[in-house]
Image (cartoon, helix red, strand yellow):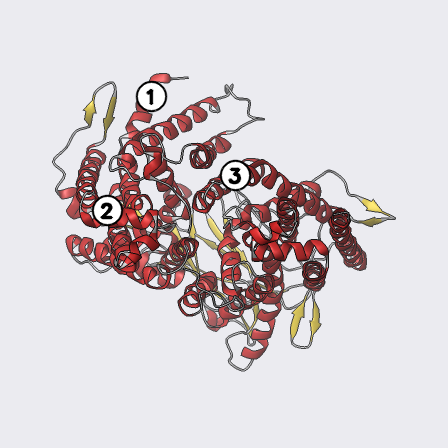
């Protein structure tokens, strides 16, 4: 068991570009779920639509990367409007079902053979990161030698991702201390009371859905850039629930909740992953093959995630840093 | 108060009757086709699909066999032209199927040059004999990526010429048969979900795992060494179904007793419970994958007998068994809900929990029974679904959204609504493949879900009350 490698790689993952992408997605969910109480179970759909807009703009149609990014974010906003119109007037669980269904519609349509020539089917698209990697100022491995280092492109992606995280946190912080943000929070607590004060609850919810969706779209774009590739399996339903777990670990309705949650949860997951993969590797593994083989070892992260989600929601719905009074979760 | 235990046991007896009927029916199917199953059907005729002899040279060949599945045994299809193209679209090999329907195309270069490359195998539709066509007319090309240093075997299913517009009606009928089977299985799962939602308000995202659980328990029984026989008849699959239903019921009871009951009592909010159910779904799904692996399984001891020709459509005895069995189950459960004391109590709790409790109904007991019956229905649906299409650890998760679509379409929490919704969704999913590619059939159903919510949020049979 090589503890140094395990810890170093876990740290690399916990601060790495994938974690930063989930952090962005979770910030979007924080606006929806944490502040407004909207149950968006389709964040993966927002990510997919924006990520695919960018990659197909460049890889399929040969258009500008920057134009693609703008269109990607706009399409995430349009998706939010489309989903909001039928569901925001209904009960919370309807929004949940419709958003999860919409995310699956998007994923299955994009991955279909029928649209193969535009979106590459199940293999997805590659070769669209040119404009982004041209800006990369790094040429050697970056990091603290001996502790944690990243390849130059990974570090560039990671840096941009975390800068975007900082920017989004700043925006969320500013929005939520404004009168507008206070209305959102009161919608979460008691929608009817807000309505009786003459506020247009529907419009506020819609604005929240759009803002969170656009942040989710940003996560999708960064996910495509960071992998230098895109395919439908990135945007499975589990992606949304990873983001939820990250959000709930850190604490919903806290500006920095998703950030703390990401680093902690991703470090923990990678640690378990590496631990079990080392414990099952080799000819004389620590855990006998009869109990767990290396394929089964890779499942431990999902079990831990499922269990974390359950236990958090049951025993500590406010997460590590949240405030219980802030988040009186209940369906109307 | 004395009557209630009796009505609980009445429901249990009813469930036992259902299972008995099912076993009898399964035995009929199995015994009726016993001899056919015992003598292996000669899938390959004397000259059909004889693989070319092994070579020892360092090349990779792309091989395949074309046989017409309409014939029994399948007849070879000779004289069909096949081309192999590399990833840039250049033709690198050509071949024609021989009298045994086999084609064998050598890729240029040594195997090491071709590893990791992707080739496209194209069939020339024009060279197919008259009347024969690809079962999937759009699938004229197959992509193969060479991962191993060995020959690759590809097949193009050949069957009826389905391209003509004249037999669209036949096709629709054939698809409707499949849709009916699917919709009844969907209805059993949806009924359970709807009952649980109605009585507890929980939108259970882990309901799909109850479905998978049934399929897995049956698979466990099925893969026990040897066969279970009664009077010389192989009843393994009937025992498997029984085991799945009983274990499913127990699993439902455990779900309620260990998790949802305590959560209800401490007053956990519905949104929080929904998130808990998602965590449970992910946890159970990974445990299933841990135990059963990621591959697709088939029930080995359930042979598929030859289909019957009913007019223009093909119906397998399995389809008939599933339709009859699940229809009987659905009728019994709905009758029990209408007529028995516990059924009436269930509807009362679904209608207004507080009022039901005030009239002396033991709400907790009702909810426990609902969980047991709902999970048993889901497990039964899982086994039968596994019998029709094979299954993997995601069986239930894949249809979870369709189960939701069915319940929302019919009206969340209504009994008949779940069944009607499932019929609509099941038939729509299958018949819509007439017009849209089969890979998008679930998408069609989900779009329908969203459209229905837009215009009739309470569902087809729900009461038009304010739901938001």
Percent across and percent down for residue B440 are: 44, 62
Percent across and percent down for residue B335 are: 71, 62
- For label 2, the residue is A182
What subunit carries mark 3? B
- For label 1, the residue is A7
**Label 3 and label 2 in one chain:** no
What subunit carries mark 1? A
Image point 37% across, 45% down: which residue?
Answer: A240
> What is the number of the mark on residue B395?
none
Q: Is residue B65 left or right of residue A53?
A: right
Between A26 and B24, which is closer to the camera in this rendering? Answer: A26
Q: Is residue B100 visible?
A: no
Asked if the residue under mark 2 is in contact with the one under mark 3, i.e. CB atoms within 8 Å, the reply is no
- For label 3, the residue is B263
Image point 77% across, 55% down: which residue?
Answer: B30
Question: Callout 3 environment at 10 Å: few (<14), some (14 to 19), or many (20+)?
Answer: some
């Amino acid at each position: 068991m090589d503890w140094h490698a395990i810890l170093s790689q876990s740290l690399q993952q916990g601060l790495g570009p994938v974690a930063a992408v989930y952090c962005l997605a979770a910030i979007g969910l924080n606006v929806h779920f944490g502040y407004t109480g909207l149950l968006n179970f389709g964040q993966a759909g927002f990510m997919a639509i924006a990520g695919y807009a960018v990659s197909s703009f460049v890889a399929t149609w040969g258009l500008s990367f920057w134009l693609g990014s703008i269109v990607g974010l706009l399409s995430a906003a349009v998706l939010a409007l489309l989903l909001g119109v039928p569901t925001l007037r209904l009960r919370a669980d309807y929004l949940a079902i419709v958003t999860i269904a919409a995310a699956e519609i998007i994923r299955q349509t994009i991955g279909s053979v029928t649209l193969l020539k535009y979106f590459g089917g199940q293999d997805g698209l590659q070769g669209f990161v040119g404009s982004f990697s041209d800006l990369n100022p790094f040429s050697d491995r970056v990091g603290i030698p001996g502790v944690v280092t990243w390849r130059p492109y990974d570090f560039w992606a990671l840096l941009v991702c975390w800068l975007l995280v900082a920017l989004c946190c700043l925006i969320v912080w500013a929005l939520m201390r404004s009168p507008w943000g206070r209305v959102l929070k009161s919608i979460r607590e008691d929608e009817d009371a807000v309505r009786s004060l003459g506020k247009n609850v529907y419009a506020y919810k819609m604005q929240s859905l759009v803002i969170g969706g656009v942040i989710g779209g940003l996560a999708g774009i960064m996910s495509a850039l960071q992998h230098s590739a895109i395919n439908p399996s990135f945007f499975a339903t589990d992606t949304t629930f990873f983001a939820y777990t990250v959000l709930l670990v850190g604490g919903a309705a806290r500006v920095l909740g998703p950030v703390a949650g990401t680093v902690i949860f991703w470090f923990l997951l990678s640690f378990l992953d590496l631990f079990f993969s080392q414990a099952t590797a080799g000819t004389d593994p620590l855990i006998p093959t009869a109990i767990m083989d290396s394929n089964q070892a890779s499942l431990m992260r999902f079990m831990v995630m499922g269990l974390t989600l359950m236990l958090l929601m049951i025993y500590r719905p406010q997460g590590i840093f949240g405030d219980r009074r802030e988040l009186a979760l209940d369906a109307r | 108060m004395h009557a209630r235990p009796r009505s609980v046991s009445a429901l249990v007896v009813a469930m036992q009757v259902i299972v008995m009927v099912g076993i009898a029916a399964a035995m009929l199917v199995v015994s009726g086709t016993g001899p056919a199953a015992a003598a292996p059907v000669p899938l390959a005729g004397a000259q059909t699909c004889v693989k070319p002899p092994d070579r020892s040279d360092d090349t990779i060949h792309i091989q395949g066999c074309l046989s017409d599945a309409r014939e029994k045994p399948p007849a070879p299809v000779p004289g069909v032209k096949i081309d192999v193209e590399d990833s840039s679209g250049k033709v690198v090999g050509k071949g024609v199927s021989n009298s045994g329907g086999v084609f064998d195309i050598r890729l240029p270069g040594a195997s090491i040059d071709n590893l990791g490359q992707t080739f496209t195998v194209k069939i020339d539709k024009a060279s197919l004999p008259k009347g024969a066509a690809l079962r999937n007319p759009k699938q004229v090309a197959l992509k193969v990526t060479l991962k191993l240093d060995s020959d690759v075997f590809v097949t193009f299913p050949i069957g009826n010429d389905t391209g003509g517009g004249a037999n669209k009606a036949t096709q629709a009928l054939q698809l409707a048969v499949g849709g009916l089977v699917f919709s009844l299985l969907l209805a059993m799962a949806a009924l359970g979900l709807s009952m649980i939602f109605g009585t507890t308000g929980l939108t259970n995202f882990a309901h799909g795992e109850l479905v998978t659980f049934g399929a897995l328990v049956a698979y466990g029984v099925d893969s026990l060494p040897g066969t279970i026989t009664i009077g010389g008849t192989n009843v393994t699959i009937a025992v498997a179904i029984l085991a799945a239903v009983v274990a499913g019921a127990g699993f439902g009871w455990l779900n309620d007793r260990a998790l949802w009951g305590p959560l209800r009592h401490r007053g956990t909010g519905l949104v929080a419970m929904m998130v808990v159910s998602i965590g449970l779904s992910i946890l159970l799904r990974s445990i299933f994958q841990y135990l059963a692996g990621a591959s697709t399984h088939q029930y080995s001891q359930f042979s598929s007998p030859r289909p019957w020709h009913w007019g223009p459509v093909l119906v397998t005895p399995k389809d008939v068994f599933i339709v009859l069995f699940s229809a009987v189950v659905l009728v019994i459960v709905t009758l029990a809900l209408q007529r028995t004391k516990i059924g009436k109590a269930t509807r009362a709790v679904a209608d207004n929990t507080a009022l039901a409790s005030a009239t002396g109904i033991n709400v907790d007991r009702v909810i426990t029974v609902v969980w047991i019956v709902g999970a048993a229905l889901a497990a039964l649906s899982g086994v039968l679904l596994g019998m029709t299409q094979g299954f993997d650890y995601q069986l239930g998760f894949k249809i979870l959204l369709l189960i939701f679509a069915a319940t929302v379409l019919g009206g969340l929490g209504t009994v008949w609504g779940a069944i009607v919704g499932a019929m609509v969704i099941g038939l729509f999913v299958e018949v819509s493949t007439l017009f849209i590619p089969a890979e998008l059939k679930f998408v069609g159903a989900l779009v329908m879900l969203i459209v229905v919510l837009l215009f009739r949020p309470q569902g087809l049979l729900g009461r038009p009350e304010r739901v938001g």
